[in-house]
């Protein structure tokens, strides 16, 4: 059995494949989530027997969050795969995440808020080398962080 981690909040989209909780393959794509997720998962489902999918449920691109959630939730229901989630801060060492303009998402303990920051270096998003399923939640609803700008 294999597990996957999907981070589709910004470009590049990143997928990690885990066997016995160890990272064995990394896939990156600059293509749009809506176009590349079906292509990648057709290949992954043909190659691996997937038990769990973990995805970063935000904050990030609204459209990428929506697309990845709907695609992964549907896939998991149809294929009887367990879907788990966590926020993107898990994958970037809790560094600020760009929102819009000088606005950044920051995580203070368990609360995600926005703050105005200037010249904030962004921390790269990285897959964990060891997958600890207990770190992730069954609460998989997307986290958008800020409302739509009108």
Image (cartoon, rainbow, N blue to C red):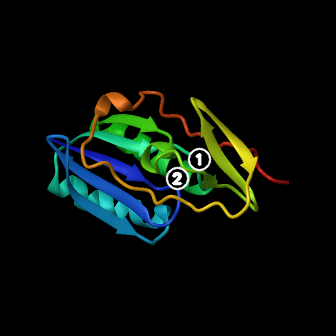
Q: Secondary structure at mark 2?
A: helix
The residue depicted at 32 percent of the width and 27 percent of the height is: 134
Q: Residues within 10 Å of mark 1 (few under 14, many from 20)?
A: many
Q: Secondary structure at mark 1?
A: loop
Closer to the observer: label 2 or label 1?
1
Give the residue at mark 1: 59
Q: Position of residue 51 (x, y in %)?
A: 23, 38
Q: Position of residue 73 (x, y in %)?
A: 43, 40
Give the residue at mark 2: 67
Q: Earlier in the sequence, mark 2 or mark 1?
A: 1
The residue depicted at 57 percent of the width and 29 percent of the height is: 110
The residue depicted at 46 percent of the width and 60 percent of the height is: 124
Q: Residues within 10 Å of mark 2 (few under 14, many from 20)?
A: some
Is 20 drawn above or below residue 46 in the view shown? above
How far apart are labels 2 and 1 at the CA level? 14 Å
Quadrant where the C terminus is found in the figure: bottom right
54 and 112: which is toward the camera: 112
* Residue, far bottom: 30
Is 19 drawn above or below residue 136 in the view shown? below
Quadrant where the N terminus is found in the figure: top left
* Residue 123: image tag: none
Q: Position of residue 121 (x, y in %)?
A: 59, 62
On screen, residue 57 versus residue 1, left or right, reads: right
Q: Position of residue 87 (x, y in %)?
A: 50, 41
79 and 92: which is toward the camera: 92
Picture quarter containing residue 106?
top right
On screen, residue 80 versus residue 137, left or right, reads: left
89 and 71: which is toward the camera: 89
Label total for image: 2
The residue depicted at 34 percent of the width and 48 percent of the height is: 5
């Amino acid at each position: 059995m294999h597990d996957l981690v999907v981070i589709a909040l910004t470009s590049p989209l990143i997928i990690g494949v885990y066997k016995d909780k160890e990272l064995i393959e990394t896939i990156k794509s600059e293509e749009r989530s809506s176009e590349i997720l079906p292509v990648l998962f057709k290949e992954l489902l043909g190659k691996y027997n997937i038990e769990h999918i973990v995805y970063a449920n935000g904050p990030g691109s609204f459209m990428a969050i929506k697309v990845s959630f709907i695609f992964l939730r549907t896939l998991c229901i149809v294929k009887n795969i367990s879907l788990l989630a966590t926020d993107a801060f898990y994958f970037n060492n809790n560094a600020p995440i760009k929102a819009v303009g000088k606005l950044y998402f920051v995580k203070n303990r368990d609360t995600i808020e926005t703050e105005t920051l200037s010249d904030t270096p962004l921390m790269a998003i990285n897959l964990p080398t060891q997958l600890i399923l207990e770190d992730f939640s069954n609460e998989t609803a997307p986290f958008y962080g800020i409302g739509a700008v009108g």
